[in-house]
Amino acid sequence: MGTIVCQDCQEVIDTYEEEKVTTLYGTCPNCSGK
């Protein structure tokens, strides 16, 4: 199971199927407009 976390506010944006536990960093819609 993988999670996508906002690099600005640390909120979990999404989860996806993955064999091992991984974390990707992105920007959520709330922070991307700034």
Image: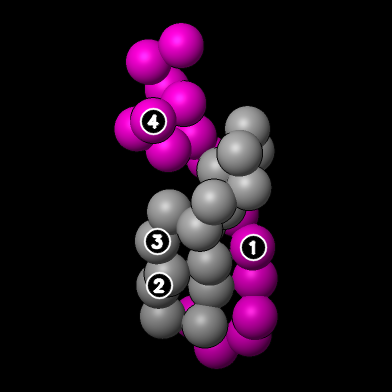
Tell me, yes or no, whether the two marked residues, 3 and 2, touch with CB atoms within 8 Å: yes
Distance of mark 1 from mark 2, alpha carbons?
10 Å
Query: Does residue 3 show up magenta in the picture?
Result: no
* Relative depth, front residue between 27 and 31: 31
Q: Which contiguous range is marked in magenta?
A: 18-34
Say which of marks 4 and 3 sits in front: 4
Between disc 1 and disc 3, the foreground one is 3
Work out how far the residue at label 1 is from the one at label 3, CA to CA, in angstroms.
Answer: 10 Å
Residue 19's place in the image compared with 16, above or below, is below
Q: Which mark is residue 14?
A: 3
Q: Residues within 10 Å of mark 1 (few under 14, many from 20)?
A: few
Q: Which mark is residue 30?
A: 4
Tell me where residue 26 appears, x and y as whole percent.
53, 40
Which quadrant of the figure has residue 24?
bottom right
Residue 23 has which mark? 1
- Considering depth in this image, is 20 or 33 the residue closer to the camera? 33
The answer to which of marks 1 and 4 sits earlier in the sequence is: 1
Tally the marks.
4
* Three-letter code for the amino acid on which mark 1 is drawn: Thr
* Residue depth check, mark 2 versus mark 4: number of the one nearer the observer: 4
